Amino acid sequence: MKYLHTMVRVRDLDAALRFFCKGLGLSEVRRADNPAGRYTLVFLAADTRPDLPAVELTHNWDQTEPYTHGRNFGHLAYEVDDIYAVCSRMRDLGYAIARPPRDGRMAFVRSPDLISVELLQQGVALSPAEPWVSMPNTGEW
């Protein structure tokens, strides 16, 4: 058995791509538009190799209302080289850091469609540093 992808529905494809690509640093590995079904599928991965697990963004063209979601989904998780750099980039792009990396190891951010994304520091945790140490949690994750 091989893990392929996780699918999340997004209402605004451009906003989702800004979050996942510009913010998190993922790359688009393939895209499929289906005019008959009125949807677009965009597959994103941390590497452009097509054999790696991906996040599938499903954009239903006619969806105007926010999607409902439950806590049963959980979150996506990515290991990062420098958690402080990723959190700084996300904050600079205007995304709230829901759970700051106070411990130098773990943080959570949420996409425009409220998908929780866990960030985990690769290897050993970084030394605690400001502004993260004193930053409070924001909302849910």
Image: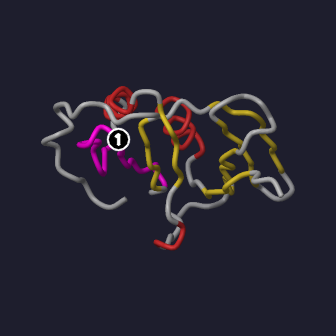
Give the residue drawn at x 62%, y 58%: 9
Residue sitting at x 43%, y 43%? 119
x and y percent of residue 60 in the render?
A: 68, 57
- Region rendered in magenta: 96-113
Residue at 25 percent across and 31 percent down: it is: 127
Given the current orientation, which residue lies at the most extreme front position? Answer: 124
List the residue tagged with mark 1: 105
Residue type marked 1: Arg
Q: Is 35 placed above or below 47 here?
A: below
- How many numbered dots are placed on residues in this image? 1
Residue 121 vs 8, above or below: the answer is above
Looking at the picture, tell me which residue is in the foreground, 16 or 51.
Answer: 51
Looking at the image, residue 126 lies above or below residue 101? above
Residue 100, position in %: x, y? 27, 44
* 120 over 90 or under it: above or below: below
Q: Quadrant of residue 27?
A: top right
Q: Nearer the viewer, residue 125 or 17?
A: 125
Q: Is disc 1 placed on a helix, strand or loop? A: loop
Crowd class of label 1 (few under 14; some 14 to 19; many from 20; radius 10 Å): many
Q: Quadrant of residue 6?
A: bottom right
